[in-house]
Image (spheres, helix red, strand yellow):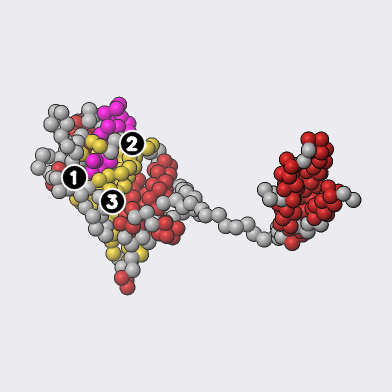
Amino acid sequence: MDEVEALRAELLSAVSGASDLAALEDARVNALGRKGRLTERMKSLGALELEARKAMGARLNVLRDELNEALAARKTALSSAELEARLASERIDITLPVRPEREGRIHPISQVIEELVAIFADMGFTVAEGPDIEDDFHNFTALNMPPDHPARQMHDTFYLPPDANGERKVLRTHTSPVQVRTMEAGPPPYRVIAPGRTYRVDYDMTHTPMFHQIEGLAIDSSTHMGHLKGCLIDLVRTFFELDDLPTRFRPSFFPFTEPSAEMDIGCSRKGGELKLGQGGDWLEILGCGMVHPKVLELAGVDPTRYQGFAFGLGVERCAMLKYGIPDLRTFFEADLRWLRHYGFAALDTPSLATGLSR
């Protein structure tokens, strides 16, 4: 056996005898690497005579091709064997439950708005919307608020810089401007609710600079105070899921309604714990009244032909009372731990007929 045949037998034996992919790589480097045995042998061809160099070069090229084919075949065999071994050892128990997925949670504000909108929808109300940035007329004047009204003061209201005409717009302090815009848009009857953000300069455990309200408006030729009371009594009893929830209406004052009233619901405060229902105590829940004739007139509605009622309630306050949330500020802190605790897996909507079903 000459030198080339001996080298061929040795290198091919190392390839076929490789027990794993790491050993096969060592065999490849030993044969075909930069300093491999076949590589070094081919570098020495320059020292041979021309005819001898041609003959030896042809034989070494054939050997190189054989080695490459052997390496590829052995690599395929070893890879298949390695995969088979992994499949045999890494079995999956398909009877195990899947890994839990992280679920998003519905924010209590979104949940409560959905609940209230569903209840009012059963009463025939539709949702109306308006801009968050309002002018003085729609936010104050059209609602019968005089120039010296406390709500117009800078320490109560967020004012924007004056425009070219010197007018200073405001972040709306309530959603009542939506009612005004609804009346301006066309003739009665109206039966709308206006959910949305409102803004006031205040911040403590029960107040935040931005909060949510739902205000309602019902105007036609025959609506009276009895309709207002029946609507709101049904509202609170359905929302809090208490068929016998006590209610009462106390005289009050709002510049945009006459007469005006505060609505209270019954509760108990025994042991320092607030519990809605029977108990002998009362808790204010919302403000309401018959729409002031001047408000109708300023919105272009004839107060001699039409009358109706309006009301407003805070969404966060309703959420705190129903779901036991103690601090209003936590609604806006973006704490995922809080949301996982107080949030909802899906929107649940109540109806007047069935209440809230979960």
Q: Is 184 covered by the magenta stretch?
A: yes
- Marks 3 and 2, the one that precedes in the sequence: 2
In the rendered image, which quarter is residue 289 located in? top left
**How many angstroms separate mark 2 from mark 1 (CA)?**
21 Å
Name the front one of labels 3 and 2: 2
- Earlier along the polypeptide chain: callout 2 or callout 1? 2
> Please, what is the three-letter code of the amino acid marked with disc 1?
Thr
Q: Is residue 27 above or below residue 217?
A: below
Residue shown at the point (27%, 57%) measured from the top left = 206
**Relative to residue 81, is residue 143 drawn left or right?**
left
Q: Which residue is denoted by mark 1 in the rendering?
A: 157
Tell me the kind of residue under disc 2.
Answer: Glu
Of the numbered discs 1 and 3, the one sitting upstream in the chain is 1
Give the class, few, some or many, for how many residues have Cα within 10 Å of label 2's Cα (few <14, many ≥20).
Answer: some
Q: Amino acid at mark 3?
A: Leu
The magenta segment is: 171-192
Question: Which label belongs to residue 129?
Answer: 2
Q: Position of residue 301 (x, y in %)?
A: 24, 29
Q: Residue at x 63, y 57 (%)?
A: 98
Task: Say what secondary structure mark 3 lies in.
Answer: strand
Q: Is residue 243 visible?
A: no
What separation in Å lies between label 3 and label 2 (alpha carbons)?
A: 20 Å
Residue at 73% from the left image edge and 53% from the top image edge: 30
Which residue is at the front of the view, 246 or 3? 3
**Pointer 3: what residue?**
286
Farthest top residue in view: 186
CB contact under 8 Å: marks 1 and 3: no
